Amino acid sequence: MICDAHVHVGQFRELYTSPNDIVNFFESLCVDKYAVSSTSTCMPSEKANPIEEMKELSGLAGNKLVPVLWVVRRMLANSTLKESVECGVNWRCLKIHGYFEQWEEDEIEYVIDVARELRLPLLFHTGGRPESDSESYLDIIKRNQDVTCIIAHSRPIDQALKVLEECPNCYADTAFTPAECISELIINGFEDRVLFGTDYPLHDYFYPGQDMSALYRKIILDTQSVMSEQQWDKVSHVNFEKLFL
């Protein structure tokens, strides 16, 4: 069984991935469940409507989908976060991206309060610049230990390990994470808090022309290669089910 904790639908720069594209791709690879957020949220276009994409995807994927609400700062400024939360999608996680936007600490605290009220985990993008590295979220995750958090990408790995060590309420995902860094997560005893993730379909943007199905299978094999079968069971689906289902 495989559950992918980090998937995107919608507009990403010049790449558009439709709800139907997502469902067909994962059906072809026999992926059982997938947590999806819409990149259209931070890259609006005439073609892309993130709420409508998630509603369509929910209808197509059914219980295979774990919908993730990507929260951007303008939702706080214009009070549309409540509308997005109540739009009819059965959200199972919230997400903020500290690389695309520079978040103030009080804004993050506000989103954490929403996650607490909704009893949902909160995912943080990590990496790309110091302001969005894992350790930049250490204090706020530690202060809010009644809210489950996820550090996506586990970047940089030494900081991700520190956050996991100090914050038992924190998980890490493996999207775009090198196998040697995933190995560090396992060696250091965090197999119960690591989520398999891929960032599909963004590989199609960063590595155009590759066979995405073959690349996805390679990511699975590379991840499996640094852990035991029992550990892979946890990373590939048990932890996902524990957190989202």
Image: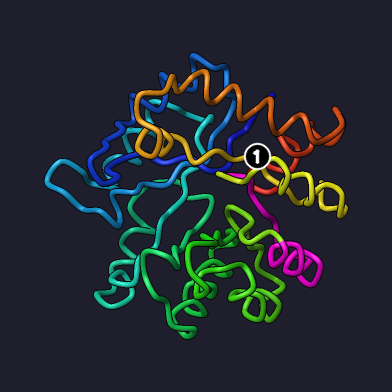
To which quarter of the image does residue 96 belong? Answer: bottom left
Residue 144 at x, y percent in the picture:
66, 77
- Name the outermost residue toward the bottom: 106
Of residues 224 and 23, the one drawn nearer to the viewer in this rendering: 224
Q: Is residue 189 left or right of residue 215?
A: right
Q: How many marks are shown on the rendered structure?
A: 1
The span shown in magenta is 158-175
Question: Does 211 appear in magenta?
Answer: no
Question: Is residue 66 depicted above or below 69 in this figure?
Answer: above
Residue 174 at x, y percent in the picture:
63, 45
Colour logic:
rainbow
Of residues 185 and 88, the one drawn nearer to the viewer in this rendering: 185
Quadrant of the image for the C terminus?
Answer: top right
Report the residue at 58% width, 54% height from top. Answer: 152
- Name the outermost residue toward the top: 28
Report the residue at 54% width, 72% height from top. Answer: 112
The amino acid type found where label 1 is placed reads: Phe
Q: Which residue is mark 1?
A: 196
Question: Does 173 appear in magenta?
Answer: yes
Q: Is residue 177 left or right of residue 12?
A: right
Q: Residues within 10 Å of mark 1 (few under 14, many from 20)?
A: many
